[in-house]
Image (spheres, rainbow, N blue to C red):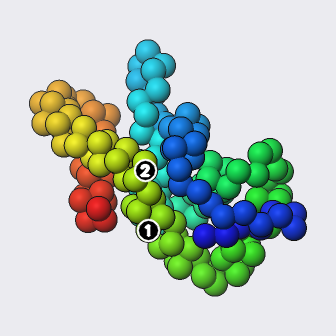
């Protein structure tokens, strides 16, 4: 997929650098502040959930543009999606790009397997409403991943 920002067109690359950047910028952290390395999965589930703002984040990690202003990114997304007319096509294209990238696919599948192992443990510890909500969130993410991988 090609993206243009300020008259510079680049192909989004879902290589190791993009995976590293995704995991560096978009991963969740545990209680001790440790990066959980799930940034690629977080981007993927945001695509599956229809979160249009994820397009900006994917351009940041896979575009290789360096530092660009938010306004330039927003203009790029408007152009890419033809002012929203092709938003579903763009999201579907990004989903396919992540699924077909060896690096992203491996990372997402590894996170999916980790969720499968963690879910029974989380369910046993779900003794508060907050923990029960976390279990339900994990189940929703797990379903999205199972349905789309």
Q: Mark 2 points at which residue?
A: 104
Quarter that holds the N terminus: bottom right
* Residue at 56% in and 74% down: 90
Residue 59, position as x, y percentages in the image: 65, 56
Q: Do the residues labelled 1 and 2 touch (CB within 8 Å)?
A: no
* Residue at 70% in and 81% down: 82
Viewer-closest of 60 and 105: 105
**Compared to 114, does 83 lie above or below?**
below
Q: What element carries label 1?
A: helix
Q: Is mark 2 on a helix, strand or loop?
A: helix
Residue 5, position as x, y percentages in the image: 81, 63
Q: Which mark is residue 96?
A: 1
* Residue at 77% in and 45% down: 66
Residue 47, position as x, y percentages in the image: 47, 62
Count of labels shown? 2
**Compared to 123, does 13 lie above or below?**
below
Viewer-closest of 95 and 116: 95
Real-space Cα separation, disc 1 to disc 2, in angstroms:
11 Å
């Amino acid at each position: 997929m090609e993206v243009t920002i300020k008259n510079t067109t680049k192909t989004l690359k879902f290589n190791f650098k993009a995976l590293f950047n995704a995991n560096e910028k978009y991963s969740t952290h545990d209680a001790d502040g440790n990066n959980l390395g799930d940034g690629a999965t977080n981007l993927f589930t945001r695509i599956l959930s229809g979160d249009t703002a994820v397009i900006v984040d994917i351009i940041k990690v896979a575009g290789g543009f360096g530092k660009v202003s938010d306004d330039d990114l927003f203009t790029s997304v408007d152009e890419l999606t033809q002012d929203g007319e092709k938003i579903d096509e763009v999201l579907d294209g990004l989903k396919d790009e992540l699924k077909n990238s060896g690096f992203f696919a491996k990372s997402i599948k590894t996170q999916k397997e980790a969720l499968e192992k963690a879910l029974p443990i989380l369910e046993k510890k779900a003794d508060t409403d907050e923990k029960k909500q976390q279990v339900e969130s994990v189940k929703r993410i797990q379903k999205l991943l199972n349905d789309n991988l």
